[in-house]
Image: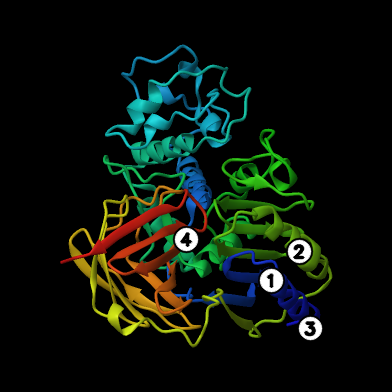
Amino acid sequence: MSQKIRDAFTKFIDRAVEKNYGLHSVILMKDGDKAAECFWKPYRPEYNHMLNSLSKSFTSVGSLFAMQEGLLSPDDLLTDIFPGYITCERMKKLKVRHLLTMTTGHESEPDAVFGCEDGVSAFMTSELKKEPGEYFLYNTPSTYMVSAVVKKVTGLPVFEYLRPRLFDKIGISKDVWWESCPRGIPYGGFGFNIKTEDIALFGQFLLNRGSWNGEQLLDPKLIDTATSRQTYSVGGGDWACGYGWQFWICQPRGTYRGDGAFGQYVLVMPEQNAVMAITSGTHDMQAVMTAIWEILLPVLNDEKCSSGDTLVLSRSLPTVNSDANSQPRDALIGRPYQLFHNPLDINGIRVDSADKITLTIKGEERTIRAGSCEWIENDLGVDTPLSVPFRIMLTPHIAATIGWWNDHTFELLMACTRNAYVQKLNLKFAGDKVNGEFSQNLAGPPINLGGCVLR
């Protein structure tokens, strides 16, 4: 690989660490080959990662395959696909293309679609304040409806429909999964869980305009339509450049992307013959893209990438910065504390040692081993609720690091290794009482925790 590309990629990674972008993984594809990658411990290449709204772009491609097979048209009316609902007059004009372009006519998202038994009914009976096609509103329920349409016309959930047509063809992992509503419809706009390399393969398929190993899997004209500006968009920076069919148009000429909350990206750069796949946990998604446009894009314009020479870097999420000499007092070890009612259903806590904490969650003990200045992986074995974005929840797969500030106060960091969240548990013990808080890096206010010795 070109030394200039190596240097630019390393500079981008260094910028991400310096500015604390919260990246979890980055893969750069250039000229059809994997040019470089970096994973931040405790995240690993073999782990699926929650995509949030990057899921939308996969749903879009599912609809493109249905169009190619003659099962669907962008001008099909939603009321023809889902007849029998009592709808407003504007809903009778709503077409599949309006779902894809987020121009349904809603002035606000019909939130009732999620969390109910019949999301299709909730959408079809919602009120449209504007004419379909005239008003852009980023609208996750509209993507759910694209997913519902794909299932209705193909008989399969979108990821099962895509498996033989796309995933198996380009080498996407077998163990990807997509959360679904009570009626078995994948949520479409979120809930897809996939590996970073699978995101990169998807991006390469898009860059190839539907071709893979000499086989044209999808009509390039459909990809061109989906990934070009079909409507205006609302926002600043890279969100102001227009929207396609569940793809965003980017600032550099010819570039486009799918993205998801907190920094899940597939960035496609046709003029540079390059793709970037990124997972992360950040509030500043624009900063990540700006760094790519400033540091990597100019070099990718001019340099070629030879095959078989991948730059592999490794970094780590920050661990707890505490007093390395502090240990829990002997009287604290093994004492069970009962916690007052809290939304996390953590019923109790016990300090087993400086690096081992046992939480009682819904009446069952779950022991967490945590490293000092390192991440140690754990499987809590808890049931995970639907991972609707922005929900504070305990997840099964975590890695933990701990630091004691003195003999009665500690901070425990838990990185959720399959999604964007890093959670923090701060607790202070004072005699028979314990007080502290649980917080999450990306969503929700801190949750106060308190309790007393269980006698």
In the figure, residue 202 lies in which quadrant?
A: bottom right
- Write down the residue under mark 2: 272
Instruction: Give how far across and how far down residue 427 sits, in percent.
Output: 40, 66
Identify residue type, mark 3: Gln
Q: Mark 1 points at which residue?
A: 30
The quarter holding residue 328 reads bottom left
Q: Residues within 10 Å of mark 1 (few under 14, many from 20)?
A: many
Q: How far apart are marks 3 and 1 (CA)?
A: 14 Å
Observer-side mark, 1 or 4, equals 4
Give the x, y percent position of residue 254. Answer: 75, 51
Dot 2: within a 10 Å radius of its alpha carbon, few (fewer than 14), some, or many (20 or more) residues? some
Residue 173 in the image: x percent, y percent? 41, 68
Between label 4 and label 2, give the one nearer the viewer. 4
Residue 204 located left or right of residue 113:
right
Q: Are marks 2 and 1 in contact (CB under 8 Å)?
A: yes
Question: Of the numbered discs in the image, which one, if any, rests on residue 3?
Answer: 3
Would residue 324 be found to the left or right of residue 33 on screen?
Answer: left
Can you say whether 372 is above or below 201 in the image? Answer: below
SS for tag 3? helix
Of the numbered discs 4 and 2, the one sitting upstream in the chain is 2
Q: Between marks 2 and 1, how big is the CA–CA gap?
A: 8 Å
Q: Which residue is drawn at 28% across and 81% down?
A: 331
